[in-house]
Image (tube, grey):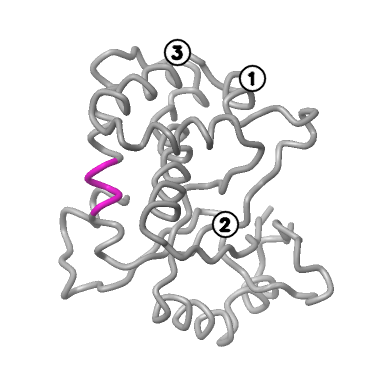
Amino acid sequence: AAYYIWKNYKKEDIPYWGLCHYRRYFILHFNPLLPYKKVYFMEANEESFQKIFRPKLEATIKQKLDEGYIILSKPYYMWKLKKWSVKQHYAKYHHIESWNLMEDALAKLHPEYMDAFHEFGSGLSMSLYNMLIASYDFWDGYLGWVFSILFEVQKHYTIPTDANQRRVFGFLSERLLNVYALHHHKKNGLKIHYMPVAHLG
């Protein structure tokens, strides 16, 4: 979906745009006393949509974009895995070969990102779901970068037959979005606003 939008729309058409998920959406906190809550589990019904898509949500997103932020989901911490790193988490749930090929491609094509890659991979948290709202310029830079890496991995990786693991490029881009944002935050002062997510069952 991101690739299609990138190749079919111009900055003049959509100066800002974003992606959510078929059952996950950015949301504002229901209870300001719980500012660290990351996910709200909700039933998929009209009442839930009314709670999620409030005018204040749109106003908050617009304000943050006007202030130069990108918007990502609140980071998920790997506590349930006894503080396993992001890389260890990937190895547990996916094929580590694809991680290694991603690392090789990044080192070959964009070596200046390796510090951020290693910091992220050894860290304990990440923003999930490939959810991002940002300016067209940010998307343009990110998508050119991420697809160069994914296409390089594709040359060397046999896509698994398993229905879940076939989504390998989504899993890799989910990690690479974090690497890209971390690199630009540390090197260029990128401002990141994290929002909780509504998960509709």
Choose the circle earlier in sequence order: 3 or 2.
Answer: 2
Choose the circle earlier in sequence order: 1 or 2.
Answer: 2
Q: Nearer the viewer, residue 151 or 21?
A: 151
Labelled pair 3, 2 in contact (Cβ < 8 Å): no
Mark number displayed over residue 116:
none
Residue 196 in the figure: left or right of residue 155: right
Q: Residue at x 80, y 75 (%)?
A: 31
Q: Nearer the viewer, residue 187 or 178?
A: 187
Amino acid under disc 1: Lys
Displayed quadrant of residue 25 = bottom right
Is the residue marked by circle 2 packed among few (<14), some (14-19), or many (20+) residues within 10 Å? Answer: many
Q: Residue furthest front?
A: 187
Between the C-alphas of marks 1 and 3, the distance is: 12 Å
State which region is magenta: 141-145
Q: Is residue 30 above or below residue 106?
A: below
Residue 190 x, y percent position in the rendering: 41, 61
| Residue receiving disc 3 | 97
Labelled pair 1, 3 in contact (Cβ < 8 Å): no
Q: Is residue 170 above or below residue 130?
A: above
